[in-house]
Amino acid sequence: MCGRFAASTTPEDIVEHFGVAQWDPAETLAPSWNVAPTQPVRVVLERIPKGGTAPVRQLRVLRWGLVPAWSRSPESAVKMINARADTVHEKPSYRQAFASRRCLVPVDGYYEWQTAPSETRPRRQPYFVSRVDGAPLALAGLYEFWRDRGRPADHPEAWLVTCTIVTTEAEELLAPIHERMPLYLQPQSFDAWLDPALCDADQARSLLVAPEPGLLQVAPVSAAVGSVRNNHPGLTAQVTPEEEGLLF
């Protein structure tokens, strides 16, 4: 599962790391160490630009929480922040996006909570999961367009573009914390995953494979991350049981 993450990498660094060819510097988004559902996030995707003839790799800002094109309202977004890799190809909410609207969500790392035993009441200990090498985690995602039928199609607020993060079974390091983890990809898989021409479901499903274990690290962090009001770099810093007074 992925319900909160940190994203502080500059757009310039994302452009370089992911080979982005088109982005709008005016489409600003402040660094965040506590990104929550329905908030704006940066994604890398490939689409044919208006007036163009070939797909171009772009850096865009979308809203986290997918709203299917057929949805009557965008209120379902908070329930669709994750899509299971084992059913994403067949679920009505995701299958159209999975066929040709795949994206990557670059993050510093993500937070996961583990319920720890206690003599009084269970405590939920947050952990921060990131790459050992410090590179951005390229989370596999899907994006979708939703139109507000109450507005003209050319109205600036008529269209909402949203995204979701694909999850898979947790690797051994993370399984004691949570049974699932966001699916992340290695650079050699970026081209195929982003290719909008790859629309065969079986071929696309072959990409839903997590890298071999050993690339991730996990550290206990402050319970302060549990409140979206807290947002600073210290949220990703490792803490000790003594510092937090929690059981690990």
Image (cartoon, rainbow, N blue to C red):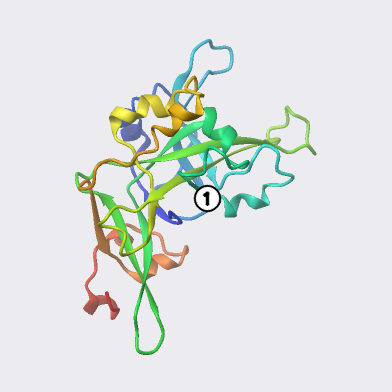
Q: Is residue 32 visible?
A: no
Amino acid type at image mark 1: Ile
Secondary structure under the numbered disc 1 in the rendered image: loop
Please state, as top left, top right, bottom left or bottom right, where the N terminus lies in the image.
bottom left
Q: Which residue is mark 1?
A: 81
Residue 234 lies, with reference to residue 89, above or below; the image says: below
Q: Position of residue 103 (x, y in %)?
A: 46, 34
Residue drawn at (67%, 52%) of the image: 75
Q: Locate residue 3 relative to residue 50 in the image: left or right.
A: left
Q: Residue at x 40, y 59 (%)?
A: 231
**Position above or below: 176 against 92:** below
Q: Which residue is at the front of the view, 144 or 229? A: 144
Q: Quadrant of the C terminus?
A: bottom left
Image coordinates for residue 10, horizontal then vertical, percent? 34, 39
Q: Is residue 196 above or below residue 151?
A: above
Name the side, left or right, on which 227 lies relative to 65: left
- The count of marks equals 1
Residue 114 sits in quarter: bottom left
Q: At 39% across and 32% down in the image, what residue appears?
A: 206
Front one among 175 and 185? 175
Looking at the image, residue 216 lies above or below residue 152: below
Residue 243: image x %, image y %?
24, 76
Residue that sits furthest to the front in the current view: 202
Label 1 CA crowd tier, 10 Å (few <14, some 14–19, many 20+): many
Most extreme residue toward the top, as rendered?
A: 53
- Where is residue 177? Give x, y as percent: 33, 64
Query: Depth check: 197 or 172 in front?
Result: 172
Q: Is residue 223 visible?
A: yes
Outermost residue toward the bottom?
A: 120
Location of residue 159 (image quadrant): top right
